Image (tube, rainbow, N blue to C red):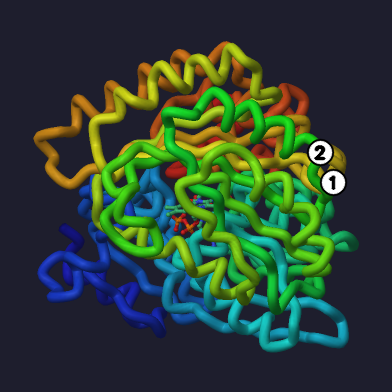
């Protein structure tokens, strides 16, 4: 517990909301998306502006308290909240400024993906983000940002053209091509290691407003043929087209046909973001392949695609994820998938292979810390359940499946990591990139104030 005098010292310098244990808003404010995370901070400092970030950071450092930084609070590892420390909570900062003439947008760190899409699509523009609109833009950008239009326009981090941040010392620094370009490089994939980002600026692209999206639903009984087809189809796809193979037990809800309810299926989900006639043509082989249970593909608004999966990922459930980048979907990898998928224990769990390549692969290590651009797929097991008594069985399934996929792994996407240790953070980067991140950390945060994250520790920490 903080003393009254300590709290008062912060109150005088703080414009936003300070939430401590005992405050009726404390219980909801300490919760993050992953219901497994149950931490009790000493203070949640819901910052109204940059000055609040400086004040909260100074307060935490003077008292020697741990610091957590919260954007959207969606990260599965739950590092946006801590025990007994100070949460620098940016979720109330929602400002968005679109400049259609410059094709750029500025966003504050509490903005969610759907909020950004709505603002930019008003002008027929978008920057690539992720696939679930309730995800925080801040954490997604700092770790990379993989979504439906990344093959065409690059991951989110490649479209980050400038950022303002408050460093561990409370200094305000801009990172751009002209100012501190080394820092911009690190923010493009190196996570929340270098400071608290208070403003993000992105490049925009003409997108939609209509795209072709949806998916072909196949029984998992046909998995060998479906995954083989998927690998070949993805390899030949133009940049406008992204395919994701997602395997899950069908919920008893539309748009899935009643005869599929409860079955394990693989949906080959797509987004074609380009000329719609060309898209129909590019999708013809996919739509005529095999014996689909349903064809759910149609033209739709880009914003409808971006919000369409939100209902499948509600906040508060128990979530345990394991993930690998996969270079090539070999017959061996497909055999492993076919062996482990039917052992899935929860009707809420799933796993997916997200199609990479295209502009993601063409980005360079010299412009962004974001790594493993040669991977063809991001493979992720999303284990989800509601009863904490079931945790062990679900976690065991995910671990066994992920271990079996390890021989096919070329690394891991940092934004998919749980609390998995230093070696797994290293696995998110090429060795020389990791060393460059350590050197940057040494410059901007030598005492590792920002360590509740996928931590790049400075030398000697
Ligand atoms: C349902 C769901 C769907 C997802 N889909 C995708 C997807 O399609 N594509 C994809 O790439 N990823 C996806 N992700 C992963 C997502 O990118 C990460 O979870 C990301 O960290 C979420 O950002 P956030 O701001 O909500 O995170 P938070 O939990 O708020 O923060 C995560 C970490 O980011 C850092 N951080 C956050 N804000 C700041 C800031 N302003 N300054 C400095 N550091 C900061 C901190 O270290 C913090 O611990 C998904 C996650 C979920 C839960």
Q: Quadrant of residue 134?
A: bottom left
Q: Is residue 262 visible?
A: yes
How far across and down, in percent of the image, does residue 340 sit?
Answer: 38, 20
Quick one: SS at disc 2? Answer: loop
- Disc 1 to disc 2, C-alpha distance: 27 Å
The numbered dot on residue 438 is none
For image coordinates 45% across by 47% down, the residue present is 293
Left or right of 256 on screen, residue 180:
right
Q: In this rendering, is residue 248 above or below 129? A: above
Question: Label 2, on which residue?
Answer: 236
Residue positioned most to the right: 178
How far across and down, in percent of the image, does residue 123 sit?
Answer: 74, 87
Q: Nearer the viewer, residue 152 or 37?
A: 152
User: Is disc 2's CB within 8 Å of ligand 1?
Assistant: no
Q: Could you tell me how many numbered marks the image carries?
A: 2
How far across and down, in percent of the image, does residue 66 sit?
Answer: 36, 48
Q: Quadrant of residue 231?
A: top right
Quick one: SS at disc 1? Answer: loop
Q: In this rendering, is residue 142 above or below 58? A: above
């Amino acid at each position: 517990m903080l003393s009254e005098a300590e709290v008062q010292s912060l109150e005088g310098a703080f414009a936003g909301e300070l939430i401590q244990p005992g405050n009726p808003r404390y219980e909801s404010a300490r919760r993050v998306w992953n219901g497994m995370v149950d931490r009790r901070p000493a203070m949640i400092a819901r910052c109204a502006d940059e000055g609040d970030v400086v004040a909260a950071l100074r307060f935490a450092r003077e008292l020697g308290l741990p610091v957590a930084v919260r954007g959207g609070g969606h990260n599965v590892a739950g590092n946006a909240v801590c025990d007994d420390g100070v949460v620098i909570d940016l979720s109330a900062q929602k400002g968005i400024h679109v400049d259609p003439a410059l094709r750029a947008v500025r966003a504050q760190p509490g903005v969610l993906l759907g909020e950004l899409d709505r603002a930019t699509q008003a002008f027929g523009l978008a920057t690539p983000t992720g696939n679930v609109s309730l995800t925080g833009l801040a954490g997604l950008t700092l770790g990379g940002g993989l979504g439906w239009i990344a093959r065409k326009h690059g991951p989110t981090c490649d479209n980050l053209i400038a950022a303002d941040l408050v460093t561990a010392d409370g200094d305000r620094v801009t990172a751009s091509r002209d100012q501190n370009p080394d820092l911009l490089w690190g923010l493009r994939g190196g996570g929340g290691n270098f400071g608290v980002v208070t403003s993000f600026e992105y490049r925009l692209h003409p997108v939609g407003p209509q795209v072709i999206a949806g998916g072909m639903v196949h029984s998992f009984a046909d998995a060998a043929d479906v995954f083989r087809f998927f690998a070949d189809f993805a390899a030949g796809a133009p940049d406008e087209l992204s395919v994701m193979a997602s395997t899950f037990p069908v919920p008893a809800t539309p748009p899935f046909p009643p005869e599929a309810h409860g079955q394990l299926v693989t949906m080959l989900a797509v987004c074609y973001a380009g000329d719609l006639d060309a898209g129909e043509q590019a999708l013809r082989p996919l739509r005529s392949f095999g014996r689909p249970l349903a064809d759910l593909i149609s033209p739709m608004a880009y914003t409808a695609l971006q919000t369409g999966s939100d209902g499948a990922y509600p906040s508060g459930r128990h979530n345990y994820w394991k993930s690998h980048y996969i270079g090539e979907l070999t017959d061996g990898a497909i055999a492993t998938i076919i062996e482990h998928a039917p052992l899935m224990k929860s009707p809420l769990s799933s796993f997916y292979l997200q199609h990479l390549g295209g502009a993601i692969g063409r980005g360079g290590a010299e412009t962004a810390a974001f790594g493993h651009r040669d991977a063809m797929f991001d493979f992720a097991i999303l284990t989800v359940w509601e009863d904490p008594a079931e945790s062990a069985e679900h976690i065991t399934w995910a671990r066994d499946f992920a271990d079996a996929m390890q021989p096919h792994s070329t690394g891991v996407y940092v934004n998919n990591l749980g609390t998995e240790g230093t070696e797994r953070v290293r696995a998110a980067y090429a060795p020389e990139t990791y060393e460059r991140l350590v050197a940057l950390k040494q410059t901007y945060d030598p005492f590792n104030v920002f360590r509740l994250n996928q931590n790049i520790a400075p030398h000697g920490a």
